[in-house]
Image: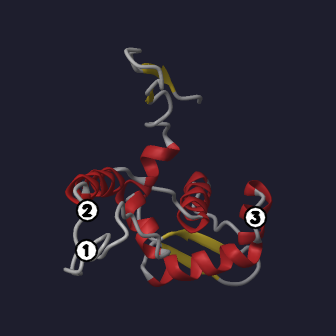
Amino acid sequence: MLLSTKGRYAVMAIVEVARQNDGRPLALSDISLRLDLSLAYLEQLFMKMRRKGIVQSVRGPGGGYVLARDADAISIGEVMAAVDEPVRMTRCEPEDKSGCVASKRCSTHHLWLALGAHIQSFLADATVADVLNGRFSGAEIVIFPVDEGAHPVVSKAEA
């Protein structure tokens, strides 16, 4: 699975809004500078998140965006869904009975569906507050070697 920039940038930007925890709105131009992201792209993402009730816009001088709810009440999955970031591991639609390849389900179809369900569950449980508070820093990464008989290598993620 490869996430598009929509999902990654939306999560990065919403964490910046949450970091501004003094109640003052954060301007998109500030987020754009902090994260080196296109202002026009951020405007599109925030419009979608506003419509889904994740952020609120504040107009006027000193305006910008604030979280619509507490950071611990906004899941990463909700943010990604708001900007239309699909979390799918298969090419076929669940309702599509025609199949993945050669007009039938591939032999690994249910494996990928199960993996997608785990990812969706993880993203639904992870909140903006979790990211802001560093819950995932130091997470273990497992690297599977290509040499036969070698054991997987487990290392800590960079902070």
Residue appearing at x 56%, y 59% in the figure: 8
Residue appearing at x 76%, y 73% in the figure: 39
* Residue type, label 3: Ser
Residue appearing at x 71%, y 70% in the figure: 27
Residue 74 in view in this figure: no
Mark nearer the N terminus (2 vs 3): 3
Looking at the image, is mark 2 or mark 3 nearer the viewer? 2
**Image height of 50 relative to 79, above or below:** below
61 to the left or right of 126: right
Tell me where residue 62 appears, x and y as whole percent.
Answer: 74, 73
* Residue type, label 2: Cys
**Image height of 76 relative to 69, above or below:** above
Between 79 and 85, the residue placed more toward the observer is: 85
Mark nearer the N terminus (1 vs 3): 3
Question: Which residue is tagged 3?
Answer: 32
* Residue type, label 1: Gly
- Mark 1, secondary structure of its residue: loop
Quadrant hosting residue 82: bottom left
Between 87 and 79, the residue placed more toward the observer is: 87
Question: Which residue is tagged 1?
Answer: 99
Among all residues in the image, which is located at the extreme front? Answer: 102
What numbered label is drawn on residue 106? 2
- Mark 2, secondary structure of its residue: loop
